[in-house]
Image: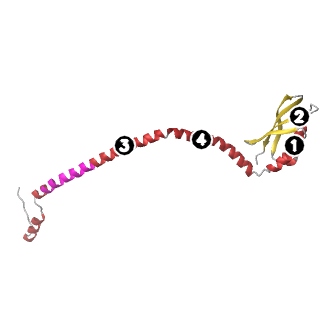
Amino acid sequence: MIEINLLPDELKARLKQKLPPAAGDMRRFLFILPAATAVLACLHIYLAAANIGKNAQLRSLTKKWQAMSPQKKQLDDFNKNYAAFSDDIKAIQKLAAERTNWPQKLARLSLDLPEGIWFRQLVIKSGVFTLEGSVLSLQDDEMGLIKEFIDALKSDAEFYQGFESLELVSVQRKALGNYSVADFVLSAKITAR
C-alpha cells in the first residue's frame, strides 16, 4: 500500500515518534494475560472457599435450630397460655381504669347479708360479677332468704351502681345432717363505661 503524507517535514517526524511499534503492544498483552488469569484464578479459589465456609455455617445453624425446636415449642405453649391470661389481665385493668370502688361494694355486700347466708366464692371475670354462696335456714326458708338478699342488693344504690342486672343463676339443695342447705349462684353483668 502506498502512503501519501502531505504534512511538512517538521510535523512528519513528530508523528512517527508518537506511533508505538506493533511488537511492543503484543509484548504488553502477553504480560497482562497471565496476570489477569492469575487474578481470576485467585478470585475463583477465594469464592469457592467462602462458599464452603458459608455452607458449613448453614449446616451448623440448622443443627442449632433443630436442637432448639423443643424450646421453641415450649415458648409457643407459653405464649398461648399468656394470651389466655392476658384477656383476664385486660379485663382487670379495664375495671381498675373505670375506678369502681370495690372495697365499698364488698362492704355494702356484707352489710346487706342476712343471717344464715355465707359466701363461698366471688369472681369477677370478663365483665361478669359472680357470687357463690350457701344458705341455712332453721325454718326451711332458704329461697326466702336468697330473695331477701337479692332484693337488699338491688335496693342498695351504692352496691348496685355499675351493674346492669343481678340474677339468681342456680340453686341446689342438699341435706347436712338434720338441716337443709341451699347452694346458690348470683350473677351480675358489669356495665361498660
**Left or right: where does residue 182 sit relative to residue 66?**
right
Mark 2 is on which residue type?
Leu
Q: Residue furthest bottom?
A: 10
Mark 2 and mark 4: Cα distance apart in space = 44 Å
Tell me which amino acid carries mark 4. Phe
Q: Main secondary structure of the magenta part?
A: helix
Give the x, y percent position of residue 103: 81, 50
Above or below — where is 87 with respect to 22? Answer: above
Q: CA distance from mark 3 to mark 1?
A: 73 Å
In the picture shown, does residue 174 fall above or below 50?
above
The kind of secondary structure element at disc 4 is helix
Q: Earlier in the sequence, mark 1 or mark 4?
A: 4
Q: Which residue is mark 1?
A: 153
Image location (x, y in percent) of residue 167: 83, 37
Where, by quadrant of the figure, is residue 168 drawn?
A: top right
Q: Position of residue 75 (x, y in %)?
A: 56, 41
Judged from the image, the secondary structure of the residue bearing numbered disc 1 is helix
Residue topped by disc 2: 136
Label 2: few (<14), some or many (≥20) within 10 Å? many
Task: Point out the tag, 4 or 3, that comes first from the N-terminus.
Answer: 3
Q: Quadrant of residue 18?
A: bottom left
What residue do we see at 79% from left, 49% from top? Answer: 102
Residue under label 3, please give it: 56
168 to the left or right of 42: right
Which of the two residues, 71 or 160, is positioned nearer the viewer here? 71
Taking 17 as reference, is 85 above or below it? above
Task: List the single residue furthest toward the front.
Answer: 177
First-in-chain label (2 vs 4): 4
Q: Residue at x 49, y 41 (%)?
A: 68
Q: Is residue 38 among what the camera can see? A: yes
**Of residues 10 and 147, the one drawn nearer to the viewer in this rendering:** 147
| Label 4 sits on residue | 78
